[in-house]
Amino acid sequence: MFEPLLSQPAPWRQLLALVLASTVVMGSPGPATISVTAAGAAFGLRHSLRYTCGIVLGTIAVLLVVATGVTAALASMPGLGQLLAAASATYILYLAFRIATAPPLAARTAEASRPTGPAGFLLAVANPKAYVAIAAVFAGATSSEAGAGLGPWTKLGVLTLMIVAIHALWLVAGAAFAGMLRRPAASRVINLFFAATLVLTTVLAVYG
């Protein structure tokens, strides 16, 4: 009578499996995470918070779309997907250009050059990697024994917290380079590196 109950994984193991899966799959480099890191490095922690919040809110919106099954309806409208992808790619190229040409932090005065929250939201909801990664984690947690005992609201709550934590860590990692960007030579090299990485991860996300 008690054997099926005893054979179920403990709740903390289920949560740990979900956290580990989301860290590996959702936390890997992609257009959103790399753009947050690049923004933190190029514009500093404080001036990248709005953009990061936009990315986080957009990624949470993707999570809700995936969890409610709306992705099937979106897939039936290829024109919308192409439009969002084109808009996202255009902004990513613009953002990569702004990062590559950004002056050293000490010389910055232009508010308009900093990435904005709405732009981050747009990039997140049009990011193809987000749908694939979140769908993989959510589906795995739903179908596997490790996630069988977790309710849908628990999964949504855990994954929402992981989205916030993952992007916050990527932002802090990028901001750690900000001190080096006060030197013009180091600023140019690091900004060019992040801009190229941003474009590369986007190409891999779309065509990989």
Image (tube, helix red, strand yellow):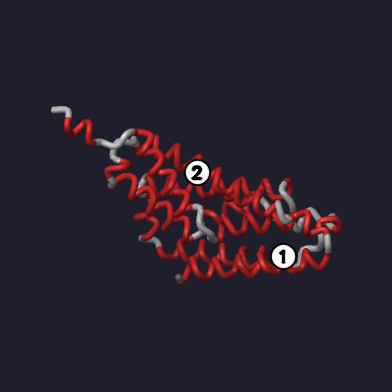
Q: CA distance from mark 2 to mark 1?
A: 27 Å
In the image, residue 19 above or below residue 98: above
Whole-percent x, y for residue 2 in the image: 17, 28
Residue ID at (33%, 49%): 140
With 164 as the anchor, is 40 left or right in this view? right
Whole-percent x, y for residue 118 in the image: 62, 51
Whole-percent x, y for residue 152 in the image: 35, 38
Q: Looking at the picture, which amino acid does disc 2 mark? A: Met
Q: Residues within 10 Å of mark 1 (few under 14, many from 20)?
A: many
What is the number of the mark on residue 26? none
Q: Secondary structure at mark 1?
A: helix
In the rendered view of the protein, which quadrant contains the N terminus?
Answer: top left
| Furthest-top residue in this view | 1
With 9 as the anchor, is 132 left or right in this view? right
Q: Looking at the picture, which amino acid does disc 1 mark? A: Asn
Label 2 close to label 1 by CB (< 8 Å):
no
Q: Secondary structure at mark 2?
A: helix
| Furthest-left residue in this view | 1
What is the number of the mark on residue 191? 1
* Most foreground residue, 202 or 81: 202
Residue ID at (39%, 35%): 154
Q: Which residue is mark 2?
A: 162
Q: Residues within 10 Å of mark 2 (few under 14, many from 20)?
A: some
